[in-house]
């Protein structure tokens, strides 16, 4: 029998949980502060013209944005020489692909996620269909993109932003940092523009609106549409309840 923690009363359990919760809140605030620093990272101009193979032919890095302002490219290892080839991609990269949330929410924040590997498109299409990854845009690297952006020997997420047709690299998350990726929030927190909400510490002029209000069902996003008025009421009531609870805790 393992040396388990003590068995306590409900009151003692709540007290222990409150002690740990204080540390969790501190961690959340530290994570928000780190994301704010990412939003102030210098940008690196992308000067080389990279070419990818896609389901419909050749695509540039600019094409991968799909018209949106931001792009995150995950370098997934699926190619000859990788364990599992040709039936599977790398086990770790596959676990990550299984965690990718519905991309409609990320797209609603003017951000595109794409995967890139060196496998031919026919193999990528087969893999996506068999593994349930049809929603993930997945391209074939044909040049030095992976080496130039630090992901030729190991997986990683590179974030980019564009100003018209000019592209800039803004951040890289790799190694154990990739463990947290997959949610709308983890992706947005690594981007130059962040979650684009009014509570964030962002440089002057960055896009910001009220939290929660931009949320929608994944099938119901309409560009530039006003928030659902019923949802505004519901989320406002929730925010008010949280503020009341937190004020009582502080007292």
Image (tube, rainbow, N blue to C red):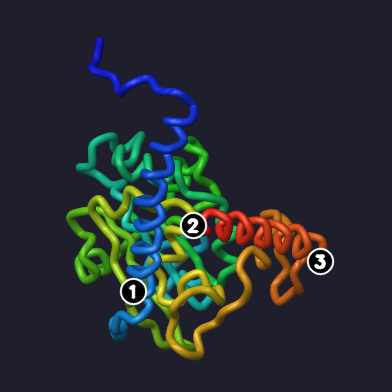
x and y percentages locating residue 77 in the rendered image? 29, 49
Residue bearing mark 1: 38
The residue lying at 23 percent from left, 42 percent from top is 82
Q: Nearer the viewer, mark 3 or mark 2?
A: 3
Kindly state the secondary structure of the residue where label 2 is placed: loop
Kindly state the secondary structure of the residue where label 1 is placed: helix
The residue lying at 28 percent from left, 47 percent from top is 79
Q: Nearer the viewer, residue 94 or 145?
A: 94
Q: Is residue 123 visible?
A: no
Quadrant placement of the N terminus: top left
Quick check: marks 3 and 2 in contact, CB under 8 Å? Answer: no
Residue bearing mark 3: 229
Q: Nearer the viewer, mark 2 or mark 1?
A: 1
Q: Quadrant of residue 138?
A: bottom left
Residue bearing mark 2: 137
Compared to residue 169, the image places residue 214 above or below, namely above
Q: Quadrant of residue 213?
A: bottom right
Kindly state the secondary structure of the residue where label 3 is placed: helix
Compared to residue 169, the image places residue 247 above or below, namely above
């Amino acid at each position: 029998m393992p040396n388990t923690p003590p068995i306590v009363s409900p009151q003692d359990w709540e007290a222990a949980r409150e002690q740990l919760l204080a540390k969790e809140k501190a961690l959340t605030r530290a994570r928000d502060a780190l994301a704010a620093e990412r939003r102030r990272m210098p940008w690196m101009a992308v000067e080389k013209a990279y070419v990818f193979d896609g389901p419909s032919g050749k695509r540039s890095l600019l094409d991968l944005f799909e018209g949106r302002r931001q792009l995150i490219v995950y370098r997934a290892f699926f190619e000859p020489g990788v364990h599992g080839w040709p039936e599977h991609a790398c086990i770790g990269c596959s676990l990550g692909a299984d965690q990718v949330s519905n991309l409609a929410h990320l797209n609603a924040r003017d951000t595109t996620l794409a995967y890139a590997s060196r496998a031919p498109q026919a193999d990528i299409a087969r893999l996506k269909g068999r593994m349930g990854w049809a929603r993930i845009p997945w391209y074939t690297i044909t040049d030095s993109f992976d080496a130039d952006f630090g992901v030729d020997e190991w997986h990683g997420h590179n974030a980019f932003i564009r100003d018209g047709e000019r592209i800039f690299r803004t951040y890289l998350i790799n190694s154990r940092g990739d463990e947290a990726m997959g949610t709308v929030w983890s992706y947005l927190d690594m981007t130059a523009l962040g979650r684009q909400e009014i509570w964030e510490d962002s440089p002057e002029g960055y896009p910001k609106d009220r939290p929660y209000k931009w949320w929608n069902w994944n099938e119901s996003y309409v560009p530039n549409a006003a928030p659902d008025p019923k949802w505004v009421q519901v989320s406002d009531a929730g925010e008010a309840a949280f503020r009341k609870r937190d004020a009582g805790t502080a007292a």
